[in-house]
Amino acid sequence: MSSNPLLSLPAGSRMGKTTPIGPILSPLLWGGVFIFLPLLISGCTSPESPPPIPPPPSLHPSRASVDRVMSALVSGDFSQATMLLKKMPSSQEKTLLTSLLADDEKNEALRQAVASLSRPSAQDLNLRLERLYALSHKSYSSLFRSLSLPRQEKILREMIAHGKERLAIRTLRHTPSMTGAKSALIAEAYAQWAKRREGESRLYDALGLARQALKIDPGNPLAAAIVKRIEHLRKQKVTQGLLAYRHRHLHQAIHLWEEAQAIDPSKKEPKRYILKARAILEKIRSLASPQK
């Protein structure tokens, strides 16, 4: 009897029969579990939350800062109050305190100016009035207009005599009560201002101020004398430059003509001389340089 070949195969390999896959897949399944389980656990847990964002600093000043500013204002220490306000952040409190500081400074300047009116020191009065003008034009004008005309004129002349010509001119231009002597006083202020600039060797400024004085008052003797002196000096420098040019001292000539032109740039003659001398110097340099 022939043996059936199928009987010699393993039971799971016979036709119509399937080999159980459980024993085969079990190692694979357990391996997958061990691989993906940590990933699943890490995915389910929430990541570490970032540190909380700190709140923005408060834009409102502290109560202590406000109290320090108020204390400085009450004591009249305006410089201390100004310094404290600069350190405070922008806020409604700072705006109000700044307004209080401005009002207190203006009132104190007005009080000091009024007190100085009864003092003999003109210099002290000029300083007080200048301070008041810088803080409040309106308060300054109101105080000045409240004075009598003789007192106004006296104060203005003291301003001019003590180097406060600019303040005197501004005051005169905004004082309608001084109709008769206004033009003469403004011209005098410009003339004294020109004299002061002449003493500082600021000849261009001095010449312009003196001419402004003569434009307002052609008969002002001080302004006329200043213009005459400065014009004479300017012409003298032009003549000295021509003399140096004739002696072939070109650099000295140019320097003198530049000084003359700086005094009065409206004069074109020195500029023509300068251009001519520089052209000669350039030609000399080109002839002296080695030919390539």
Image (cartoon, grey):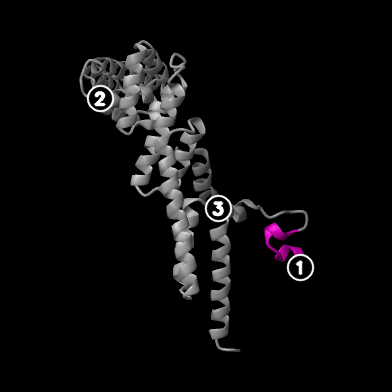
Residue occupied by mark 3: 267
Q: Is residue 56 visible?
A: no
Q: State the residue at coordinates (76%, 68%).
A: 3
- Please, what is the three-letter code of the amino acid marked with disc 3? Lys
Is the Cβ of the residue at disc 3 closer than 8 Å to that at disc 1?
no
In this view of the protein, which residue sits in the foreground, 193 or 216?
216
**Label 3, label 2: how far apart the Cα atoms are:** 41 Å
Q: In x, y percent, where is residue 269?
A: 56, 58
Crowding at mark 2 (Cα within 10 Å: few <14, some 14-19, many 20+): some
User: Is residue 36 visible to the viewer in this orientation of the structure?
Assistant: yes
Q: Quadrant of the image for the N terminus?
A: bottom right
Residue depicted at 51% across the width and 46% down the height = 37
Mark 2 element type:
helix
- How far apart, in angstroms, are the residues tagged by discs 1 and 2? 147 Å
Pointer 1 with pointer 2, Cβ within 8 A: no
**If you read the primary sequence from the N terminus, does the residue marked by circle 3 or circle 2 appear first?**
2
Circle 2 residue: 122
**Structural crowding at the residue carrying mark 1, measured as other residues with C-alpha within 10 Å and reported as few (<14), some (14–19) or many (≥20):** few
Q: Secondary structure at mark 1?
A: loop
Q: Nearer the viewer, mark 1 or mark 2?
A: 2
Residue beneath the point at 44% across and 58% down: 236
Give the extent of the magenta segment.
2-14
Residue underneath mark 1: 3
Q: Which quarter of the figure has residue 14?
A: bottom right
Q: What distance separates the C-alpha of mark 3 from that of mark 1?
A: 141 Å
